[in-house]
Image (cartoon, helix red, strand yellow):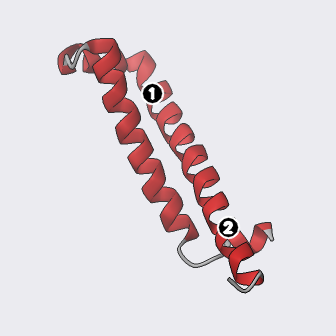
Amino acid sequence: MFTNIISAKGFWVDVVKLAAIFILIYNVVDIWLNYSFDLALYAETKFQTDKLLKFFVANILSGFVYGFVVSFFKFRKRFKNRSNGE
């Protein structure tokens, strides 16, 4: 079942779309709650040379995990509905 789901047409496209949306929303909320929409302070804090790699890796990994989990359950539900004849 797992390999059928991750090899389904559109699965990885869905993962990437959801990951991008998650990263965007997460960072907007972070800017709003922690920096009061002060983009200069946000950029100064997040894009420091020693924190830049951590920022990008954390965003990409968290977005991927979110996108993968949500897409997996969405496609699993679709596969179950097809196998039940619904």
Q: Is residue 47 left or right of residue 36?
A: right
Q: Which residue is drawn at 66% across and 59% down?
A: 73
Q: Where is residue 54 in the image (x, y as percent from the top left)?
A: 50, 25
Q: In this view, which residue lies farthest toward the front?
A: 86
Nearest the camera: 23 or 82?
82
The disc placed on residue 77 is 2
Quadrant in the rendering for residue 83: bottom right
Q: Can residue 80 be seen in this view?
A: yes
Q: Is mark 2 on a helix, strand or loop?
A: helix
Query: Taking 74 as reference, is 84 above or below it?
Result: below
Residue at which label 1 appears: 55
- Disc 1 marks a residue whose amino acid type is Phe
Q: Position of residue 31 (x, y in %)?
A: 30, 22
Q: Is residue 12 left or right of residue 80?
A: left
Contact between marks 1 and 2 (CB within 8 A): the answer is no
Q: Is mark 1 on a helix, strand or loop?
A: helix
Q: Where is residue 24 in the image (x, y as percent from the top left)?
A: 35, 40
Query: Taking 64 as reference, is 75 above or below it?
Result: below
Q: Which residue is drawn at 36% across and 20% down?
A: 46
Quick one: quadrant of the C terminus? Answer: bottom right
Identify the mark nearer the N-term, 1 or 2: 1
